[in-house]
Amino acid sequence: MSGDIKKDIRTEARNFSASLTSVFLGKKRDPQSKHLLEKAQQLIDGLLAEAPSRPSPATPPPRISRGGAGMGQLWVKLDELKRENDDLKRHRGRSSDDKAGSPKSPKSPKTHALPSHVDTSASDLQRLKHENDALKTQVEKLQKNLKEHQAVNTSLQDEYKRLKVALEAAQKSAMKAREDTKKLESGLKTLKAENEAIKHKTTHTQAPTKSPKPSISSPKPRARTDNRLTENISERCRPSNIAVAYTTLESQEWMDAKERLEEYSDDEESITKFLCDLLLKSFQASTHVIQSVETIIAHILANPVSAVSLLAGGHVTSSVQLSDEVSDFVCQKLRASFDNINTQVLAELTKEAVDYSSPVVSHFPDPSLQNYVRQCGALTWQMVLQKPPMKLCCSDSRFDEAKHKLWWSCDQSKAKKINYFIWPVLYDYEGGNLMVKGCVHAS
């Protein structure tokens, strides 16, 4: 009977040693538990190894009962510690420790957790709480940064769309500018070829003639001051500057007057015809003024005493013409003071010659229209002071891309016959070189 009891105690000791091994594997992170478990396992293994070699003494029954009672107390203590350990694990909510601490079978009990391990678990719990709070704070910051990045991304997408539209418009403008540049280069080549042809023709047609040697008493002939072929850059009133001002007149004052008249009428054709006619009438008025100046000067030179009657309010009825030298000299002096012309008088002369059958003529007193007429007078006055005078042309009947620009509402492929002029063609003189293209409505 005592042999069976010893055999049962050895079996329980071996089972207990095996359970210590599994507990050691599960609790190897705690140094103190590791040390105690290793020590207990060594003691039990040593006792089991020495038990067969020693003679089995006759152990009195009370001794055996005391050993059995000690094992029972160990099991009770182990169960209490297991329940306490399970409560701590449930409190921490760690499923991995739950699997390691729960018993697999009633025959494989686990060792108990020591009080130091309880303190370590509490400190781990506090540390994990702090880490969790720090992670929550970090997540909130990341969410805030994400919202800010999304807002920036949205604004960047909107800006990209706007820049894309602007880029497309700029590309279209660049393509149009390149086309215009090609047309201008082609026109420039044509003009250069015409200029070379004219120079070649002039050189070969004008044969040098030997003029008789003038006498000592006769004056030397004075060359004409023709500022058409060679411009005097010291003069502000010269053809190249006039061409620039002519283009500016079209893009500013003409446009302002057109937009103002469109507030009164929707008839675009009548408005553009009327503005073009005003420019031509202003050119005619300036021509009349310079011709009157030359006529009066010629009359006074031919009949000096007539200056008295002119001062008294008389009228000049003379067919005498100024010589070329005097005419050049007069225009040169007038070009030096071209900006002193009274544009209001030229505007009144233009108003007298305007076509009153136009439906928009009733709006002539409009300030924008008055400003346009005065600017036309100032510019056409400079045109007629050139020698020979510059020329405005509205007499073409066929559309020519070299001389005309097409109005925006016309079809380029069908433009052949000119219906009416929007803007006259400017030449440096009658039959001379083209300075500025005109604008026409053609079909």
Image: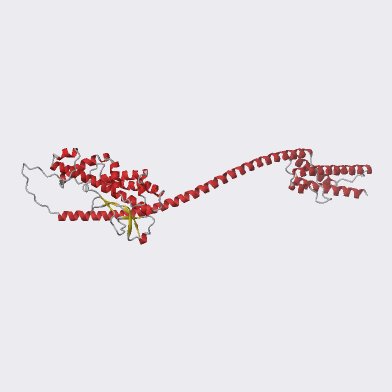
Q: Is residue 385 visible?
A: no
For this rendering, which residue is in front, 279 or 204?
279
Residue 169 in sight in this render: yes
* Left or right: where 260 falls relative to 220: right
Residue 200: horizontal and vertical position, in percent? 19, 55
How many discs mark residues in the rendered view?
0
- Measured as percent of width and height from the top left, residue 243 is found at 29, 47
Give the color scheme: rainbow, by chain, secondary structure or one colour: secondary structure
Q: Observer-nearest residue: 105 or 404?
A: 404
Please state which of residues 140 and 307 is positioned toward the viewer in this rendering.
Answer: 307
In the rendered image, which quarter is residue 306 located in?
top left
Q: Is residue 334 left or right of residue 107?
A: left
Side of 292 relative to 181 (left or right): left
Query: In this picture, is 443 found above or below 100?
Result: below
Is the C terminus in the top left, top right, bottom left or bottom right quadrant?
Answer: bottom left
Residue at the (93%, 42%) spot, across then down: 62
Percent coordinates x, y for residue 341 in the rendering: 26, 40
222 or 259: nearer the viewer? 259
Residue 2, image x and y in percent?
A: 92, 48
